[in-house]
Structures are given as structure tokens and as C-alpha cells.
């Protein structure tokens, strides 16, 4: 039995996508960074659809190479075949969206890492672990990479595995056009046609656009080109025809392209065609490798291509399996799919990376409280930042590199701590509210247009505390809702998760329905936090109502964490026992119970750095143990 459904082989790059739309690439001012390269896109796209996928390629021994590897792992792609090249750089591609017809791009691939792939990189045991090997045309353009591809294909066929190729013809990657012609899709070349035709008999499935079959078949007449390919291989041929859909030919080529097998199409607005073919291939392979008939496989493929055409980027545009089913059920509600808010919510929620089934968060994002402690101890304000670094050390000591641990830390007093926490594996939440504000106002760094979020690392989670109550005066309620709504939109635009904390008990009376009403209201106005942070409620009914409100409105919500409110450890233990009975409550985010005494003593000079770290680590560790014990008894809602 094989453990992999699919191995893709070939290009891997970092795509730098121009954020601005409607202008020349020369005028792009900023770029989003994604993984790219056709085989890399297909590996990720099929993994999102539930296939067990792997990639065989090379990346550089530098930041971009590590980014590709790490992102593939987050996407669920097996990276055993991703080799690190110690000498060459990872390939880059710079892309833009000029209009609905022009998509300029520049390939930075001179002696790049993936073009150094060689036969020695192809491990027979790795190839034997897959049901299918999928190649793309670019790696047939150089003798060394061609040998690697041919070795992988030969091994696959010996093992009885399926083989597939996306022709993926880029003339300038075959040396037929200059660097400025990255957008070019077809230049006639007898040499390229001969090279492709020498290889096509090795495949069970051949996929390409009409132009790609023109180069493979040596004719600009599509039917004649398909017949030329058919003369040299019995493979199933899939011809992509853009807005006219795709057709499948299993036998002889008929007199009309329309006579091929078809699947349902999805007429949507074209926003960005780059990467659409890789999305199509991902859906096609999902169907083919799971035993679906060709009309169904084409349905998957056409839908995945439609998503890609309607969104920014390649891999980030591809759907999850859950999203694809949702789309089939709901249909097209807005031809500009990226503007369908409900669909985009499913896309966001089902493609988030890194699971957090347990959340043990040490919260030291406190600003007002620590400033008061420093003033009381006659300590310089700068000491607060140094203390937050000790908090991080305590958190890391308890985490020990394990999963399910995190911190809440601010950027105003804890900037250096945030820098040190980057890439540590901790969950990192970062507050934006001005401490104690009501109506809600934000830290100056966020800016009046909330543009400050564009400077945040994508691993930071936007945390906002809102003192909100259902019985607030209408003007106050509307003011706070508007701020949270704008913040939510800004977070999503910057690809940042959001945690919404609400504390109604500080501003009004509460009962078993209060928090549930607040949750319903925020969803009603279109705010879908990834996380909720709720006060330690006193009754089982209040927790049950809150959890039901979240699940009813957002079945994909990451979960809830319980805040501490400076409660004594014994009181927290009691609240944990109640909250842990609900599966949606993933853990806690507690601060002063852990750091309060240590902060006062350290700021006054009564204890050393090491003693402060040890005391906080002890309290944090004890709380983690309390939560884990409570959770072990099992949740129920």
C-alpha cells in the first residue's frame, strides 16, 4: 500500500504578486508573497482537496527556500522530496494584474535551485510510495532536469503507478523569448515539439490548453494537434478551452472539439488568470485519482479554475474540499467570487494553517496595569519592556518547544519581546485597543485608517478587547460596532487572524444569555472572529448558550479562550473546570494571576531576573496543569 496519492515534480518558486490592480508592473508599489511554480501549486491545491500529496523539487538554502518548505508543510504537503540546494537561489516570479486580459510576469530563474534537480534527487523508495507522479513541461527543457523527470516516470510506471503531465508551456523558459516575455503562452518551435513528443508516450493523462496542444502536436489547428498527439500515445487527453470549458478525449479524436466529454462550467468574472491552470489540474487530479468519471472530474477542475480566476494569487486562491462542496450547494451568487462574503468566509476558515486544539496562553499584554505598578515602584517606564522579555522567557520555559502554548503581548511596551517571539512556535496575540477605552479606541500605531496592521507579521493575531453590553445606549453600541467592523476588515485584508474579547460584566448586569446575545450581534453585522475571548462565566447554562451561539453562526470558528480577570488561582481552577466541559473552549489566556506578584517585586528590585522568571514559570505551569486536568475529564458541547 502506498501512503501518497500524488507526487508532483518540477518548478518551485516564490511568487511576488503586485497588490495594486489595474496598472503597469513598473508602477507596483507593494507585493504579496506566496508559494508558486506549477508543480508546487498543484501539490498544495490537491492537498487542500484532501489528497495526500508530495513535491519533488529543489529550493535554495535561504529564507525563500525555507518559506516554501514551511508553507508546504502548513498546506499538508509531504516535503521528503524537497531538496535543499547549498549553492543556488530559490526561483522568484514577479507578477501583476494589469486588467482582465494582461497579466505581466517576470521569471527570475537564472541557474535557480529547482533547475538543478538531478537523477540523484529521485529516491526510488519515495516514488514507490505514490499512486501517481505528475510532471510539468518546463523540466523537460534542460538535460539534467529531464533526466530526473524521466527517472521518476520510469520508476512510477515500473511500480504500476499512474503518470500525468500538465504541458505548462512557457516559451521563455525554453529559451525562446526574452525575460520581458513571461506572459507569452505560445511560440512555435520544432525542437520543443520533438522534445515533448519523445516524452508524451510515458503518460496516462496529458493536460494542456489549446496553445499547449499546438506545441505538443506541432500544429496550430487544435484538432490536428490532438490527432498528432493521439498517434503517439493512447493517453487520455484533456484540452482546456478557457471560457468554453475543457473537453476530454479517451479514444480517437472526433471532428469537433465539442464532441469530447465535458463537465459543468461556472461563468464568473475574470480577475486573474495566473495559476488558473494549476487550480484546474488540482481539481482534475482529485477526481481522477478518486475514481470519479470524467464529467465529475471536470466539474471539480472547472470549479477550482473558477476560484483561481476570481482571486488574487495562485495557491492562496485554491479551495478546500469543504469550500468546494459549499460552492456546489450554493451556486454562483456573485460572479466576482471574491466579493461573495459568505464564500470568502468559508475559504478563509477552511484554509487557515496550524491547528490549535489546546490554547494555554500567558497574557502579558497589559499596559495600564504595568504602568501603574512601575509608578508605584518608582521604576523607569523602560523597565516594563524588560519585564515583558522575562515573561516571554517564562512562557518559553514552560512550553519547552511543545505545541498549544502562546502569549499575548503588545507592541507599544513589548516591541522587543514580540521581535524575540517571532518564529518560536508560540501562538502570538497582539492587542490593538487603547487600554480601558469605552467607546473603543485603538493604539496610535494602528493609525486612523488601520493601516498599521500592514506592518504586522502574519503570525500575529489581532486581539481587541471591547467593553460591550447588549443594553448599551444605541449611539455607544453603534460606535463600538463600527470600530470592530473596520478592524475586522483590515485584519482580513492583511491576512491576519482576529481574536475578539468581550467583557460585559464590567459595564452592566449579566445573565445566562448576555454573552450569547453579544456573540449573535457581532455575527449579525458581519464580524467573524477566528477566536473569542470570554470572561469566566459562573453557570453551565451561560457557557452552553455562548458555545451554541458561536457554532450556530460560524461552524469553522477556531474556538474560545477563558480570560483571568486577575482571579486567584483557586477561583480560576473552579472556572476552568466549568469551561473545560465544552469542546469549543480550547484553553485560557491569563495574565496578572501569573505575573502580578513577580512584576511588583521585580520592578521594586526585590527579586532578580532569574527569580522572576522562575516564579512566573511555576504559576504558568500550574495553570497549564489545572487546565489539562480539567480538559481530560472530557468536553460535551
Image (cartoon, rainbow, N blue to C red):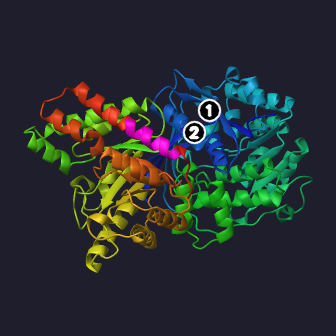
C-beta proximity under 8 Å, tags 1 and 2: yes
Q: Is residue 31 visible?
A: no
| Residue 13's disc number | none
Which secondary structure, mark 1?
loop
Q: Position of residue 161 (x, y in %)?
A: 83, 36
Q: Position of residue 557 (x, y in %)?
A: 51, 58
Q: Position of residue 539 (x, y in %)?
A: 43, 62
Quadrant holding the N terminus: top right
The one of 306 and 535 positioned closer to us in this rendering: 535
> What is the quadrant of residue 337 in the picture?
bottom right
The one of 259 and 436 positioned closer to us in this rendering: 436
Q: Residue at x 65, y 42 (%)?
A: 43
Precedes in sequence: disc 1 or disc 2: 2
Q: Residue at x 79, y 53 (%)?
A: 238
- The stretch in magenta equals 622-631
379 versus 637 height, above or below? above
Residue pushed farthest bottom?
474
Q: Residues within 10 Å of mark 2 (few under 14, many from 20)?
A: many
Q: Residue at x 84, y 56 (%)?
A: 293
Question: CA separation, marks 1 and 2?
Answer: 7 Å
> What is the quadrant of residue 3 in the picture?
top right
Per the picture, the main secondary structure of the magenta-coloured stretch is helix
Residue 630 part of the magenta segment: yes
Which secondary structure, mark 2?
helix
The one of 165 and 557 positioned closer to us in this rendering: 557
Q: Residues within 10 Å of mark 1 (few under 14, many from 20)?
A: some
| Residue 72's disc number | 2
The residue indicated by pointer 1 is 79
Residue 578 part of the magenta segment: no
Amino acid at each position: 500500500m502506498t501512503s501518497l496519492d500524488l507526487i508532483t515534480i518540477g518548478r518551485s518558486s516564490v511568487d511576488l504578486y503586485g497588490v495594486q490592480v489595474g496598472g503597469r508592473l513598473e508602477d507596483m508599489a507593494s507585493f504579496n508573497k506566496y508559494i508558486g511554480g506549477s508543480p508546487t501549486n498543484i501539490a498544495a491545491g490537491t492537498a487542500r482537496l484532501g489528497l495526500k500529496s508530495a513535491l519533488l523539487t529543489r529550493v535554495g538554502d535561504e529564507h525563500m527556500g525555507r518559506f516554501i518548505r514551511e508553507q508546504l508543510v502548513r498546506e499538508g504537503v509531504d516535503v521528503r522530496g524537497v531538496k535543499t540546494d547549498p549553492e543556488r537561489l530559490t526561483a522568484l516570479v514577479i507578477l501583476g494584474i494589469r486588467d482582465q486580459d494582461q497579466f505581466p510576469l517576470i521569471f527570475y530563474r537564472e541557474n535557480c535551485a529547482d533547475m538543478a534537480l538531478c537523477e540523484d534527487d529521485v529516491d526510488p523508495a519515495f516514488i514507490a510510495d505514490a499512486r501517481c507522479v505528475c510532471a510539468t513541461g518546463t523540466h523537460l527543457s534542460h538535460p539534467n532536469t529531464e533526466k530526473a523527470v524521466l527517472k521518476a516516470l520510469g520508476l512510477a510506471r515500473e511500480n504500476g503507478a499512474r503518470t500525468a503531465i500538465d504541458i505548462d508551456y512557457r516559451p521563455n523558459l525554453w529559451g525562446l523569448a526574452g525575460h520581458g516575455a513571461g506572459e507569452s503562452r505560445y511560440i512555435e518551435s520544432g525542437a520543443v515539439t520533438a522534445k515533448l513528443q519523445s516524452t508524451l508516450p510515458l503518460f496516462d493523462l496529458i493536460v494542456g490548453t489549446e496553445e499547449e496542444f499546438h506545441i505538443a502536436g506541432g500544429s496550430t489547428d487544435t484538432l490536428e494537434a490532438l490527432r498528432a498527439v493521439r498517434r503517439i500515445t493512447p493517453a487520455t487527453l484533456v484540452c482546456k478551452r478557457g471560457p468554453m470549458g475543457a473537453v476530454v478525449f479517451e479514444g480517437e479524436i472526433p471532428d469537433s472539439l465539442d464532441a469530447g466529454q465535458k463537465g459543468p462550467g461556472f461563468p464568473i468574472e475574470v480577475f486573474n488568470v495566473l495559476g488558473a491552470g494549476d487550480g484546474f489540474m488540482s481539481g482534475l487530479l482529485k477526481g481522477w485519482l478518486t475514481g470519479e468519471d470524467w464529467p465529475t472530474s471536470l466539474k471539480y477542475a472547472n470549479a477550482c479554475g473558477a476560484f483561481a480566476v476570481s482571486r488574487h494569487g495562485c495557491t492562496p486562491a485554491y479551495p478546500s474540499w469543504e469550500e468546494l462542496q459549499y460552492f456546489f450547494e450554493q451556486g454562483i451568487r456573485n460572479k466576482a467570487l471574491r466579493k461573495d462574503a459568505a464564500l470568502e468566509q468559508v475559504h478563509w476558515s477552511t484554509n487557515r494553517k496550524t491547528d490549535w486544539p489546546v490554547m494555554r496562553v500567558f497574557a502579558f499584554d497589559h499596559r495600564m496595569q504595568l504602568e501603574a505598578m512601575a509608578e508605584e515602584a518608582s521604576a523607569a517606564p523602560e523597565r516594563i519592556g524588560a519585564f515583558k522579555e522575562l515573561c516571554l522567557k517564562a512562557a518559553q520555559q514552560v512550553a519547552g518547544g511543545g505545541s498549544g502554548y502562546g502569549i499575548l503581548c503588545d507592541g507599544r511596551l513589548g516591541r522587543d519581546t514580540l521581535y524575540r517571539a517571532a518564529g518560536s512556535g508560540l501562538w502570538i496575540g497582539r492587542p490593538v485597543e487603547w487600554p480601558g477605552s469605552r467607546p473603543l479606541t485603538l493604539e496610535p500605531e494602528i493609525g486612523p485608517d488601520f493601516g498599521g496592521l500592514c506592518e504586522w507579521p502574519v503570525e500575529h493575531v489581532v486581539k481587541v478587547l471591547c467593553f460591550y453590553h447588549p443594553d448599551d445606549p444605541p449611539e455607544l453600541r453603534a460606535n463600538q460596532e463600527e470600530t470592530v467592523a473596520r478592524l475586522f476588515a483590515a485584519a482580513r485584508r492583511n491576512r491576519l487572524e482576529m481574536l475578539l474579547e468581550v467583557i460585559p460584566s464590567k459595564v452592566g448586569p449579566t445573565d445566562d444569555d448576555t454573552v450569547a446575545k453579544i456573540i449573535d450581534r457581532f455575527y449579525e453585522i458581519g464580524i467573524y472572529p477566528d477566536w473569542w475571548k470570554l470572561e469566566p462565566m459562573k453557570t453551565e447554562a451561560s457557557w452552553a448558550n455562548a458555545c451554541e451561539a458561536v457554532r450556530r453562526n460560524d461552524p469553522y470558528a477556531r474556538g474560545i479562550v477563558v480570560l483571568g480577570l486577575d482571579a486567584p488561582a483557586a477561583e480560576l481552577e473552579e472556572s476552568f473546570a466549568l469551561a473545560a466541559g465544552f469542546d469549543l473552549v480550547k484553553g485560557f489566556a491569563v495574565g496578572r494571576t501569573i505575573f502580578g506578584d513577580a512584576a511588583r517585586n521585580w520592578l521594586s528590585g526585590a527579586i532578580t531576573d532569574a527569580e522572576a522568571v522562575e516564579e512566573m514559570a511555576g504559576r504558568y505551569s500550574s495553570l497549564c496543569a489545572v487546565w489539562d486536568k480539567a480538559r481530560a475529564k472530557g468536553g460535551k458541547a
